[in-house]
Amino acid sequence: MEKAVIQAVEQWLTDVVVGLNLCPFARKPLRAGQIRFKVSTATEDEDLLKDLMSELRQLDATSETELLTTLLIIPNHLHQFSDYNQFLDMAEWLLDRNDYAGIYQLASFHPDYQFAGTAAADAENLTNRAPFPILHLLREENLEKMIDLYPDPETIPEDNIRRVESLSHEEKLKLFPYLFRQVNNNQ
């Protein structure tokens, strides 16, 4: 199962995040093999916090040239977006408590991701939807360097929304098949 989970996330990263250029900083570390894909077996918050801490320590122990970022994939827990969203507060608390604030940053992805003030079906939510709940651990210093080099980084979110809104239904089916299987399975 772990291999299939990683393959699904790698496919999403390649086709959606890099393919649609939703994150202009992802292509280089993906090609260089600097992204760690770690599957958590956690089914409880406490175990997931332990896995998160382990991944933070892994980043500490590994040079940036070898490991730039980690995707902690959570296939067995936090299936409801509301639960995931609440867990993010605990994850941020863990970073703060262990003096990782300002060193590492969390980015969040979930199959049912929904930005505040949007309807569940709004296309802009696709920018943060992934096949499984994911905690993306970023080295903040590296992220700041990349943002400084990028022209108009403040336009990235709006560009991403326009990009996903322009997708045809067929393109959405191809890029987000797991979303449509969930909808069909719930009917």
Image (cartoon, rainbow, N blue to C red):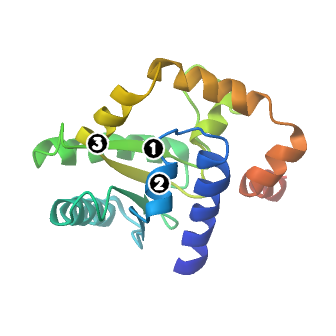
- In the image, what residue occupies the spot 41% across and 52% down? 135
The answer to whether 186 is drawn above or below residue 86 in the figure is below
Residue 72 occupies which quadrant of the picture?
bottom left
Of the two numbered discs 2 and 3 in the rendering, the one whose residue sits closer to the viewer? 3
Is residue 16 visible in the rendered image? The answer is: yes
Q: Amino acid at mark 1?
A: Ser
Q: Earlier in the sequence, mark 2 or mark 1?
A: 1
Q: Amino acid at mark 2?
A: Ile
Is residue 92 found left or right of 109 in the rendered image? Answer: left
* Label 2 CA crowd tier, 10 Å (few <14, some 14–19, many 20+): many
Residue 145 rendering spot, x and y as whole percentages? 30, 34
Mark 1 lies on a secondary structure that is strand
Is residue 27 found left or right of 7 in the rendered image? Answer: left
In this orientation, which residue lies closer to the viewer: 6 or 115? 6
Q: Which residue is mark 2?
A: 134
Of the two numbered discs 3 and 1 in the rendering, the one whose residue sits closer to the viewer? 3
Q: Which residue is mark 1?
A: 108
Mark 2 lies on a secondary structure that is strand
- In the image, what residue occupies the spot 46% across and 18% down? 154
* CB under 8 Å between discs 2 and 3: no
In this orientation, which residue lies closer to the viewer: 48 or 64? 64
Residue 1 rendering spot, x and y as whole percentages? 57, 81
- In the image, what residue occupies the spot 57% across and 40% down? 128
Q: Amino acid at mark 3?
A: Asn
How far apart, in angstroms, are the residues tagged by discs 2 and 3? 20 Å
> Residue 142 — which label?
3
Residue 156 rendering spot, x and y as whole percentages? 53, 26
* CB under 8 Å between discs 2 and 1: yes
* Label 1 CA crowd tier, 10 Å (few <14, some 14–19, many 20+): some
How far apart, in angstroms, are the residues tagged by discs 2 and 1? 6 Å
